Image (spheres, coloured by chain):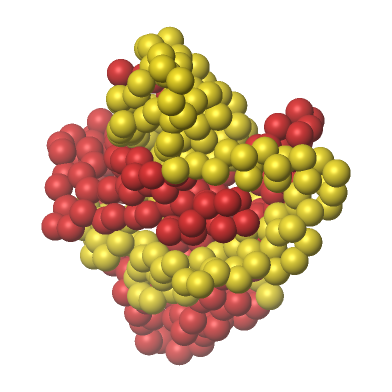
Chain colours: A red, B yellow
Amino acid sequence: MNTNASKANNGVNVDALLAAREALTAAPEAAKFRWRATCDWVNGTYSRSAVDGFFGLGDEQQRKTTFSFEADHPAVFASEDRGATPVEYVLVGLAGCLTAGIASVAQNRNIQLRSVHATLEGGMDLAGILGIDGDVRNGFEGVTVRFKIDADASREDIEALVAQSQKRSAVFDIVTNPTSVTVEVV
Amino acid sequence: MNTNASKANNGVNVDALLAAREALTAAPEAAKFRWRATCDWVNGTYSRSAVDGFFGLGDEQQRKTTFSFEADHPAVFASEDRGATPVEYVLVGLAGCLTAGIASVAQNRNIQLRSVHATLEGGMDLAGILGIDGDVRNGFEGVTVRFKIDADASREDIEALVAQSQKRSAVFDIVTNPTSVTVEVV
């Protein structure tokens, strides 16, 4: 916690978030969002994805920009490494989600952040995806996230920030808990 | 299946993948990979992540390029929309993984792909992440992936391609099954 009376500024508009919580408590339908991506195969294991609109607050939401992403497999998989590997995108999502949460919680607790750095690692035994061993899963055996945080707060308060961020993180939930995925051919 | 004797070319080196499967069956330690990302908080809910090296085949693997990604929250969350939302990165990873799998399986089955387009949608009730309702999860309620595939194959064969891709997809496994995530402050 800040030891002086000055207000922390982490660039998060917490007042707006608290107002949104109040508004969405009163209008629960508006809280139902639908996030989207599209993907086009290019060649080999290389694909391009796009992220633009989403549905929320009861309406279609358009963005000013379309975000584009390239995914591929690396050279050691006999591919050409033209983009990050799909599982690395999951790590990027997890990193971004927990980091945004830390900034938001810090703002709400009036803790000034100076820097937040995360390193993530996910172990994977390729015996799964290559079909060598049916007892080995395809995905990560586990993921470790290490945060190095410089902030105007005690170590205990920093650990509490990180814990609260985990508790409210969408991607942390998606990775740690099962989510139903329906795949259709149209 | 191809109706003539010509060999499909989807740009996937299936021979190398089958050789890798054989080699990694003989040397199981080499199949143990560690994928990584780093992330730096910039301001507000905005962060930048980087993906470069990984560990695999018993050694550190360096890439020619570092892949960089920006994540943020959208304007409707009182943020500045400077990058895709973290949960959208998960959709991008899922799309890229299933699409690479479809190309690889098609190659192995000698099916020529002409185009593969996917649209993904993940529903999310913000009552979870905003702490409005403790019974609502933070992550996706569910994800739908719709593939439109033009290929030199019957509808049945195309559906079998997609099913096999799901069966061997790392990100599909990560999203549909629980993965342990350890978060540490160093």
Q: Residue furthest front?
A: B5
**How many numbered marks have been drawn onto this rendered protein structure?**
0
**Residue A104 at x, y = what percent?**
41, 65
Q: Quadrant of residue B91?
A: top left
Q: Is residue B130 above or below residue B45?
A: above
- The quarter of the image holding the C terminus of chain A is top left
Q: Horizontal and vertical percent for residue A94?
A: 51, 55
Left or right? Give the position of A27 relative to B125. Answer: left
Residue B6 in view (yes/no) = yes
The residue at 59%/26% (across/down) is B167
Name which quarter of the figure residue A166 lies in: bottom right
Q: Nearer the viewer, residue B54 or B79?
A: B54
Measured from the top left, where is residue A117 in percent x and y? Answer: 54, 75
Question: Left of A12 or right of it: where is B48?
Answer: right
Query: What residue appears at the point 34 percent right and 24 percent down from the top-left corner?
Result: B151
Q: Residue at x 45, y 16 (%)?
A: B1
A124 on left or right of A108? right
Question: Which residue shows up at 32% across the image and 74% down it?
Answer: A11
- Give the x, y percent position of residue B113: 37, 30
Can residue A161 be seen from the camera position used here? no
A181 vs A107: above or below: above
Q: Is residue A81 above or below residue B126?
A: below
Question: Which of the two residues, A37 or B29, is positioned nearer the viewer here?
Answer: B29
Q: Is residue A22 left or right of residue B175?
A: left
